[in-house]
Image (cartoon, rainbow, N blue to C red):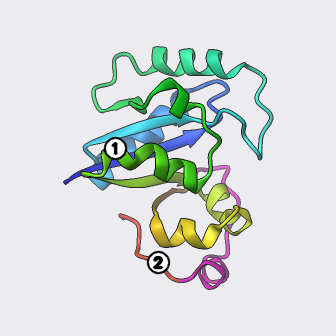
């Protein structure tokens, strides 16, 4: 079974840090590939570039990457709001693959603020990236709030 990492974000603009995170996750977690999935309407950030411009920049930045690509879903599906229900609906045709979301420690720290977060942590696996500027997250408190789940790759 193929294992694919999904890196979502505003990508406003996409930059070398995003590419480095995806490359590291690909190598350390032995993903077959990593899909970038730009958020059309981010709830926690204000995008200055239009969605179409951010998607065009993303595709341009990934042109020479072998294992990194924009998520291969239809443009209509690509533009759905980021909710677990929409991810599940869009990824349904790829039922022969296993998916893991690649998130920063800052995203993990506020996971329990997501709509239906119980469903998210029950039906989704996460690879957590600790960036230099990441906030400190009390992992024990977070695990108690979310419920203890499988460990990420080291």
Observer-nearest of 38 and 116: 116
> Residue 71 is drawn in which quadrant?
top left
Q: Is residue 88 left or right of residue 114?
A: left
From the viewer's perspective, is residue 108 above or below residue 37?
below
> Residue 15 is drawn in which quadrant?
top right
Q: Which residues are magenta?
A: 131-147
Residue linked to disc 2? 149
Q: Pointer 1 and pointer 2: residues touching (CB < 8 Å)?
A: no
Task: Please name the residue shown 64% across and 24% down the image.
Answer: 13
Residue linked to disc 1? 93
First-in-chain label (1 vs 2): 1
Cα gap from disc 1 to disc 2, whole angstroms: 26 Å
17 in the magenta segment:
no
> Residue 38 is drawn in which quadrant?
top right
Q: Residue 137 — which label?
A: none
Q: Is residue 71 left or right of residue 108?
A: left
């Amino acid at each position: 079974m193929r294992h694919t990492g999904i890196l979502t974000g505003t990508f406003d603009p996409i930059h070398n840090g995003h590419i480095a995170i995806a490359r590291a996750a690909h190598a350390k977690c032995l993903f077959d590939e990593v899909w970038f999935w730009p958020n059309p309407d981010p709830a926690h950030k204000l995008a200055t570039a239009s969605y179409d411009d951010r998607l065009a920049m993303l595709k341009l930045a990934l042109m020479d990457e072998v294992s990194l690509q924009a998520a291969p879903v239809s443009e209509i599906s690509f533009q759905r709001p980021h909710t677990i229900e929409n991810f599940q609906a869009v990824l349904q045709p790829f039922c022969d693959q296993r998916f893991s979301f690649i998130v920063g420690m800052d995203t993990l720290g506020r996971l329990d603020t997501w709509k239906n977060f119980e469903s998210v942590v029950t039906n989704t696996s996460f690879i957590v990236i600790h960036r230099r500027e990441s906030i400190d997250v009390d992992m024990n408190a977070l695990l108690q709030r979310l419920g203890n789940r499988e460990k990420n790759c080291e």
